[in-house]
Every structure is written in C-alpha cells, then in structure tokens.
C-alpha cells in the first residue's frame, strides 16, 4: 500500500516530500551525516558560523548531498543584520533559502516579531525565500505572509526547551487562517509532539535539540521521521470527532435476543 503521506509540499517553487526538517547544531561534525541519513529530511538547517569560507571544519563537508540547506540568521538583532547574514550565506554557496531569526531577548531567546517582519520585507526584496521564525501571533503572521514569506515558522515552546506544543492553540489559528505553510519550529521534545503538530495540519516541523540531546541521536531522528509521517497520514485520513463515550461494537440487539428455553 502506498502511504498517503507521500504528498509533496512546496517552498520557493521547489517540491519537498519529507515534512521533517532537521537542525545540524549541537552535534560534533562527524555525527551530523549519520543523524541526517537516519532522519532522511529534505531540508537541513545550519548556522552560518559553522560554514567556513576557507574550507576548514566546514559543516557542508559533513552533510549528505542532495539536501536543501536552510541557513539561519542567528546572531542578528536587526533586520539589516539579518540581510547581511543572508547575503553572506548565499555567497558561501548555501542558496536562497533562509530562516530568519532576529532575536534581541538574551534570556529566553524569543524572536522579535516586529524586527522579523522588517527582515522579511528586506530579504524578499533581495530575492530570498524567506522563512521567518516567530512567536505565534496571527496578526503579525498575516503581515509576514503579505510581505512575501514563503512559510511561517512559529515556535512550539521556547527554543531548546523540549517542552512541546505549549503554543498549540495559537498555532491552530495560524494553520486555519494562513495560506502559506506553517512549520512548527523550536521546543518540540518528543516524536509524539511532532505527530500532534502534523495532525493539527502543520505543514512540517523543525527539530534540533530533541534529537541532539537524545541518548541515541540517529535513532531519535528516525523516530521523529516516523512520527511525522504518522501525523500527516492521520491528518489526511480525517480525525474522528471528539465526543462522549460510545460503543465501537454495539451488542444491544444480541443481548436482548430471546432466551433459549432449553437452558
């Protein structure tokens, strides 16, 4: 049987099948290939600081071929800094896909939504496929969509926390109202939480810390890949409505049949 999850989604005019996006941070470079091969993502995020222009300890040398790189603008505190980092990533051969991170808050690392919106406008005008990482807010997300964002990436919980979908109701609103894909990013700690995000209708999930901090990262990457496929199949199958208890196999007629007179 062909799995119904083998349905593509599109970003920046390109087609993708895997709805698991894996981060490449927090690993020793030699382990990255093993983790990526286990999770089989189409898209892999990377921090620009790990792309060495001189070719020494370059993360791109440790990643399997055939993947789409999604560099982020980690470290940017303004829209202009995000644009500068995005241009540098493009010059280093990472392509036009960019995950916009504009973070001023040093304690909780929450994205600055207003500055991120400014960055979306600048990067789209410069030809980038902009994927903004943001705190769930439907009003700002709509403005990012109007500004040309290819997808919206709301956090499920504070980055690196492994707390799961603490913002699920806000993400539900975004999934229901936005026309661009919603990719849940940050905070997912268990494969079951990734499955729930896909069941809700999220286009994809991005996971890093949950895999990197597992006892067996390659095995955890594989578990997330399976969970994402299960969640997508459940969404496409159509989840049953929530109701009060009802018997799945009613026996009322059988129990009310006439008693056997010989007993």
Image (tube, grey):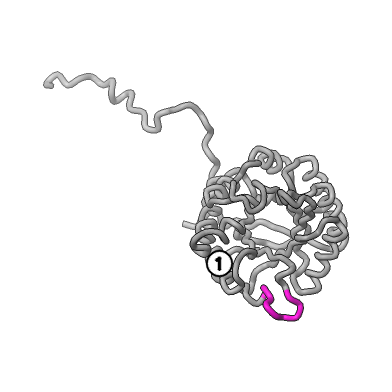
Q: Residue at x 51, y 28 (%)?
A: 243
Find residue 85 and report its horizontal and vertical position in percent.
81, 65
Q: In terms of depth relative to the viewer, which is nearer, 95 or 209? A: 209
Quarter the C terminus occupies: top left
The quarter holding residue 58 reads: bottom right
**Label 1: which secondary element:** helix
Q: Which residue is mark 1?
A: 35
* Residue 29, x across and y down, in percent: 61, 72
Task: Decide if residue 24 is on the left or right side of residue 139.
Answer: left
Magenta stretch, main secondary structure class: loop
Q: Can I make out residue 55 in this image?
A: yes
Give the number of callouts. Answer: 1
Q: Where residue 39 sits: x, y (%)?
A: 55, 63
Picture residue at 78% right of the left edge, 69% below the top: 89
> Which residue ends up furthest to the front in the rendered image?
107
* Mark 1 nearby-residue class (10 Å; few <14, some 14–19, many ≥20): many
Question: Taking the image as drawn, is residue 145 in sight?
Answer: no
In the image, which residues are magenta? Answer: 52-60
Q: Residue furthest left?
A: 262
- Picture residue at 70% right of the left edge, 80% below the top: 56
**Drawn side of residue 67 relative to residue 138, left or right:** left
């Amino acid at each position: 049987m062909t799995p119904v999850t083998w349905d593509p989604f599109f970003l920046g005019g390109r087609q993708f099948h895997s709805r698991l996006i894996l981060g490449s941070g927090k690993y020793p470079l030699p382990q990255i290939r093993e983790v990526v091969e286990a999770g089989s993502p189409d898209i892999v995020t990377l921090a620009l600081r790990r792309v060495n222009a001189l070719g020494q300890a370059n993360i791109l040398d440790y990643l399997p071929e055939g993947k789409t790189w999604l560099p982020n603008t980690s470290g940017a505190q303004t829209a202009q800094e995000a644009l500068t980092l995005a241009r540098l990533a493009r010059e280093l051969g990472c392509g036009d896909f960019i995950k916009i991170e504009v973070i001023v808050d040093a304690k909780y690392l929450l994205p600055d939504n207003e500055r991120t919106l400014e960055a979306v406008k600048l990067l789209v005008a410069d030809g980038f496929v902009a994927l903004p990482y943001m705190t769930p807010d439907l009003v700002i997300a709509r403005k990012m969509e109007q500004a040309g964002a290819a997808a919206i990436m709301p956090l499920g919980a504070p980055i690196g926390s492994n707390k799961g979908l603490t913002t699920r109701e806000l993400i539900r609103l975004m999934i229901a109202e936005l026309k661009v894909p919603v990719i849940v990013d940050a905070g997912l700690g268990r494969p079951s939480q990734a499955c729930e995000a896909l069941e809700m209708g999220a286009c994809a999930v991005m996971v890093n810390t949950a895999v990197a901090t597992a006892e067996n990262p390659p095995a955890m990457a594989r578990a997330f890949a399976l969970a994402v496929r299960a969640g997508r199949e459940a969404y496409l199958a159509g989840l049953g409505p929530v109701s009060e208890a009802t018997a799945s196999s009613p026996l009322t007629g059988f129990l009310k049949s006439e008693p056997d007179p010989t007993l």
